[in-house]
Amino acid sequence: MTTTLDGAWQRHLETVRWFGGKGAGARIVRRDPLAPWTPTGASPSVRSEVATLEYPDGHAEYYHLLVAHHPEGVDAPGTVVGTDVVDGTPVQVVDATTDPAALAAFVAATQPGFADREVSVWRGEQSNTSLVLGDDDLYKLFRRIEPGPNLDAEVLLALSGGSVPEVRGRLVAPWPEGSETDLGLVIERVADVTDGWELAAASCAAGEDFTERARRLGRALRDVHTRLADAFGTHARAGDEVADTMGVRLDAAVAEATELEPYAGALRAAFDVLRGRELEVQRVHGDFHLGQTLAGPEDWTIIDFEGEPAKTAAERREFDSPWRDVAGMLRSFDYVRSAHPDPDSNTATMWADAARAAFLIGYCGADTGDDVLPAYLIDKAVYEVLYELRNRPDWVGIPLRAIRSLTHTEKE
């Protein structure tokens, strides 16, 4: 049975940015506390808990809660979620990321080499929680977790530096039913950078040339793909299998989004170019777009290698074609047009076309890419239609516009 505190945590999760199940009817069916990070008798006491949330369709997700306990009767700082009894003592339960003293104690206990750093919470939009440690480091707390290593941790530990942030610390904890899980990673806070989406959107809105930056971004992705292949290897996958998988996703999307019905035949035919061939697949980013990049004065840094949030860890860890990531960035440049005062103007269209061409030249030396690229672009655009209908219905015209273009039809 769900306890009063479970219900309080459920309500709190609906208010935080990193919770991916908002409005989906999830309920907490279990909370497993880990051993306290802070010493016995510390006030506040800080611990992590693994919350198991079950959805109406029966699937479950696991979330990392960082919890602070303050004695009853004191004016507890931060967001008080509820009350509990711990070791026979009544306590106030606080979201530790809203409690400066709790955060300082947590960092000192789990990453003692950074105990002298000023700690604050990064306020950007994200699916995790990042703590700013002084001027040079970020402590990224993973929120949606699963048994085994976190994908972002796997990749950053394998690559560490260059076009990705350098790793400077790791927090691993026992999973409630055996094994281990990553709860956090201390990484380099890359200096003198701008969010890639914000930079591109401002450039498009102002009609500024972005081609050199786009070329450099293409080169950065190529560098990351090369290093991922070296670190994790490659293998071949039947194109028929990939086409079938894309077709299944398309069928499910058409069933939910009637807007796709006029294009379904042309979309399915576009996947057939993959048939009868083998594709080289490897570890990839999996959710690559401008929001996963940081632009420096000369170079780019690529971040957040956890893949699409809607997929399981096993699905996100599967090898895929590097053209998956290329398609993601090309679609992102199309989305940037929404920042222009007139997204359908020649100026906005030419900006996006030029950025896409330059990115491809940086990535592979040609502005057309491989002949499998259109299939991946269509698969991505179909995903976007569903995403926008579920989250931002006013934006669904952006991927539909791309689908009309990719299928060479003007049907509405």
Image: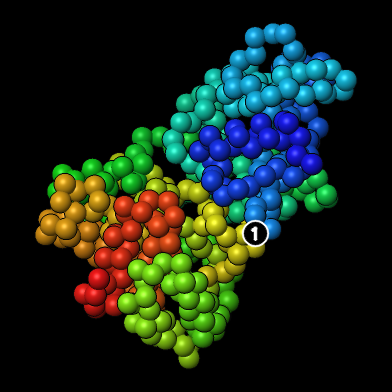
Tell which of 275 and 77 is nearer to you. 77
**132 vs 251: above or below:** above
- Residue at image position (37%, 66%) is 381
Residue 368: in sight, yes or no? Answer: no
In x, y percent, where is residue 174?
Answer: 79, 44
Q: Quadrant of the N terminus?
A: top right
Tell which of 355 and 255 is nearer to you. 255
Judged from the image, the secondary structure of the residue bearing numbered disc 1 is loop
- Going by the numbered disc 1, the residue's amino acid type is Asp
- Residue at image position (36%, 41%) is 195
Tell which of 321 and 193 is nearer to you. 321
In x, y percent, where is residue 367?
Answer: 26, 70
In x, y percent, where is residue 91?
Answer: 76, 18
Image side of residue 103 versus residue 124, left or right: right
Quadrant in which residue 119 is drawn: top right
Q: Quadrant of the C terminus?
A: bottom left
**151 vs 85: above or below:** below
- Residue at image position (41%, 82%) is 268
**391 vs 185: above or below:** below
Q: Which residue is mark 1?
A: 57
Residue 400: in sight, yes or no? Answer: yes
Quadrant in which residue 192 is drawn: top left
- Residue at image position (76%, 43%) is 30
In x, y percent, where is residue 84?
Answer: 77, 24
Tell me the colour scheme of the image.
rainbow
